[in-house]
Amino acid sequence: MSDQPDTNAVRDYLLDLQDRICRDLAAEDGGADFREDAWERPAGGGGRSRVMEGGAVFEKGGINFSDVQGEKLPPSASASRPELAGRGFRAMGVSLVMHPWNPFVPTSHMNVRFFIAEKSGEPPVWWFGGGFDLTPYYGNDEDVIHWHRTARAACEGFGDPGETSAQLHARLKRWCDEYFYLKHRQEPRGVGGLFFDDLNAWRFEKCFAFMRSVADHYIPAYRPIVARRKGLYYGDEERDFQCYRRGRYVEFNLVYDRGTLFGLQSGGRTESILMSLPPQVSFRYDWHPAPESPEAELYDRFLVPQDWLEEAP
């Protein structure tokens, strides 16, 4: 960390990012728009939550901007980061989850965030984090390869000294595979993408530029998949499987997700924090897919961390 962060530039970018993603996804849906709730946090800061429900393509989607401040961090956060003791903090970001009606359209998640902790007379402690990941219900090679190819493109031009863009992508893909993993199920949540956190080893402008690159590649990664799959026929069997698999999403968000846990522990707005949860979910006791079924293929071929670009041209 060698230069002064421009928090106003980060905030302006994130607000514009939320606007652009809402516009693009509402256009792809074609039947509904996002409604906005602007909110303030009593302890400092606020945000604007935008939610779509009952659209033509998306059963539910949430895109949240938040900029929260506080005089001290929750004990769970400060205990693991002693350098933050006695510092005020500011955390801002855009986080989204889109849950489609059609089981052949994957659920997608994206989050980018900036954190800064300051104390009079001392340099600030700051970092960026974020990424995006894909959660299909019925796997499709074309979609998954496109998703990972776009994730690789987001890394072009970046990397640590001596690290190529391809190596950076491989590192962040592996980080994503490890992060979005349900340990109690011994099962990935989806097919991954990119994930990074605590990014401050580069100068501020480079870190900020990389966060922007990741965020700006989300729509090119996701929207073509939605466009290809949203008109496919599905029946009750596919819908039932989608609702069952959504249960894994709930489990991950409530047990492991750092953003969810930080938001709840720091007194954030509960409705905004939990808006990522799917509207319809089912849980079944000890259910297993029929062998060689399309549902089994998801587990056998797609919920297996692998290099999806190895064979891709």
Image (cartoon, rainbow, N blue to C red):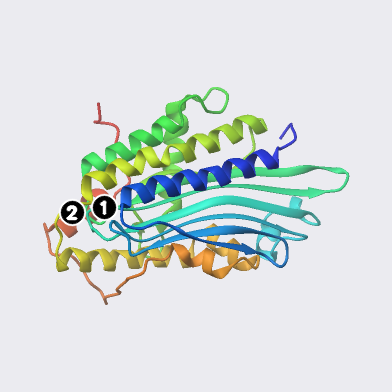
Residue occupying image coordinates x 87% and y 48% = 120
Residue 134 coordinates in the image, percent (x, y): 35, 49
Q: Is residue 247 above or below residue 58?
A: below
Disc 2 crowd, CA 10 A, few/some/many (<14, 14-19, 20+): some
Residue occupying image coordinates x 25% and y 63% = 242
Res 306 seen here: no
Label number found at residue 53: none
Separation (CA) of disc 2 from disc 1: 16 Å
Residue 51 coordinates in the image, percent (x, y): 45, 61
Residue 252 coordinates in the image, percent (x, y): 43, 63
Q: Is residue 148 left or right of residue 296?
A: right
Amino acid carrying mark 2 in the image: Glu
* Residue of label 1: 105
**Label 2: element kind:** helix
Location of the C terminus (image quadrant): top left
**Label 1: element kind:** loop
* Residue of label 2: 297
Residue occupying image coordinates x 42% and y 35% = 170
Location of the N terminus (image quadrant): top right
Residue occupying image coordinates x 40% and y 56% = 33
Identify which residue, 153 or 231, lies in the foreground.
231
Q: Is residue 153 above or below residue 224?
A: above
Say whether disc 2 or disc 1 marks the residue closer to the N-terminus: 1
